[in-house]
């Protein structure tokens, strides 16, 4: 009986549990033995024993945020000795196949294990939605909805006091979360790392709103795009408005996964096992339109995921 090991790695994302559940149950359905290793690649490097799963081991997790397998950021995996050690641990545990659920960094780690002969499929799980080759990653939809909930709440108090609110959302290198939440939440300005911002334009938009009796302004700032406190001070220097800053932080990474993320996790988890059974290796499960398709791990690093500038422009037009 062949053995599949599952690892969740990097920042957790709501819907990872749905993916783990799908890998376990589809794996058992296909006649595999399925196990998990706790704490991501760090667990592998520390020689954590594998946990063997039965059908019931993944009961009652589909509705939970985070990852019940635990996760870690493991920069050690960039070193060749660590990569060899991790592969050896898997082989010693009798593991033939690996499913890694995580973001770009996790994919890089997975590729090194694949090159050492472990049949590997990855599943994109990150709230950042920044993996090139897939329309969406697991966790993004839930995080956008969490941010929208925050925007709705801020809007109530912003309107009551006629204030400008700056809201920082996650996204160290990318602004997909900021853009989606800003567009869906009707933010007046969206500040993302991909597009240089113009402070005059941000201030003009606030003033135009005030002139037409808008009661509030919401500015969404991706964490990697600007220092939100400095931006707040700069706005106050330019125009005479009352402002407040909110940093949403890790609240946007937790919480029960949305239906979209549960479906995506379930479909991607099942596809990963189907492809292992077909002998595929070195691919990740990508959402392409309505379909889950295999995309090679190499190709996801060939270029950065293109930023949807058309949506950015639309957001600016709609919130004038
Ligand atoms: O990788 C996802 C992400 O949520 C980023 O948007 C954010 O900058 C980062 O994780 C925070 O990471 P940590 O939880 O390690 O502080």
Image (tube, grey):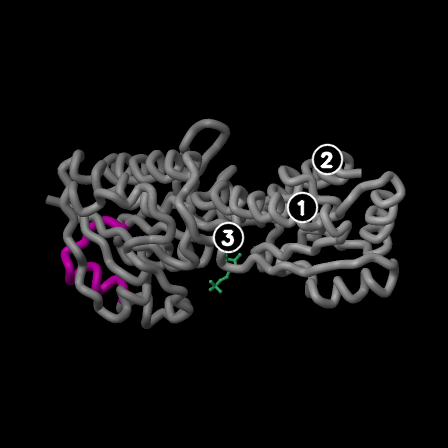
Is 71 positioned to the left or the right of 142 in the image? left
**Residue position for label 3:** 252
Asked if disc 3 is less than 8 Å from ligand 1, the answer is yes
Is 135 positioned to the left or the right of 255 in the image? right
**Residue position for label 2:** 314
Dot 2: what SS?
helix
Q: What stretch is highlighted in magenta?
A: 86-98
Residue 182: percent from left, percent from top: 65, 44
Q: How far apart are marks 2 and 3 (CA)?
A: 24 Å
Report the mark closest to the observer, 1 or 2: 1
Asked if disc 1 is less than 8 Å from ligand 1, the answer is no
In the displayed orientation, state which residue is furthest to the left. Answer: 1
On the rendered image, what quadrant is the C terminus found in? top right
Residue 63 appears in the picture as rendered = yes
Numbered label attached to residue 155: 1
Mark toward the start of the polypeptide (2 vs 3)? 3
Residue 141: percent from left, percent from top: 49, 41
Kindly identify the residue that appears in the image at 33 percent across and 36 percent down. 266
Report the mark closest to the observer, 3 or 1: 1
Tell me if residue 314 comes above or below residue 282 in the rendering.
above
Q: Is residue 171 magenta?
A: no
Kindly identify the residue that appears in the image at 27 percent across and 48 percent down. 119
Kindly identify the residue that appears in the image at 21 percent across and 38 percent down. 25
């Amino acid at each position: 009986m062949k053995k599949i090991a599952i690892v969740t790695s990097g920042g957790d994302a709501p819907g990872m549990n749905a993916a783990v559940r799908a890998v376990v149950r589809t794996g058992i359905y296909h006649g595999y033995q399925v196990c998990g290793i706790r704490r991501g690649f760090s667990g592998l490097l520390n020689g954590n024993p594998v946990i063997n799963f039965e059908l019931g081991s993944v009961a009652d997790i589909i509705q939970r945020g985070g990852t019940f397998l635990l996760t870690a950021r493991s920069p050690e995996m960039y070193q060749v000795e660590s990569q060899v050690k991790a592969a050896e641990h898997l082989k010693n545990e009798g593991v033939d196949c690996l499913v890694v659920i995580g973001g770009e960094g996790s994919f890089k780690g997975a590729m090194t294990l694949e090159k050492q002969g472990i049949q590997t499929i990855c599943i994109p799980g990150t709230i950042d939605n920044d993996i090139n080759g897939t329309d969406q990653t697991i966790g993004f939809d839930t995080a956008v909805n969490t941010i929208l909930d925050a925007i709705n709440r801020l809007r109530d108090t912003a309107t009551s006091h006629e204030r400008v609110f700056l809201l920082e959302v996650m996204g160290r290198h990318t602004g997909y979360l900021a853009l989606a939440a800003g567009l869906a939440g009707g933010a007046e300005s969206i500040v993302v790392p991909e597009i240089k911002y113009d402070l005059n334009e941000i201030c003009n938009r606030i003033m135009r709103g005030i002139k037409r009796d808008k009661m509030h302004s919401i500015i969404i700032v991706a964490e990697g795009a600007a220092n939100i406190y400095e931006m707040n001070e700069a706005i106050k220097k330019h125009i005479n408005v009352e402002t407040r800053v909110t940093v949403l932080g890790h609240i946007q990474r937790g919480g029960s996964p949305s239906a979209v993320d549960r479906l995506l996790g379930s479909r991607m988890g099942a596809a990963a096992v189907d492809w292992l059974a077909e002998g595929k290796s070195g691919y990740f499960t990508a959402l392409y339109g309505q379909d889950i398709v295999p995309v090679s791990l190499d190709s996801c690093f060939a270029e950065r995921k293109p930023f949807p500038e058309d949506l950015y422009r639309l957001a600016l037009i709609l919130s004038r």
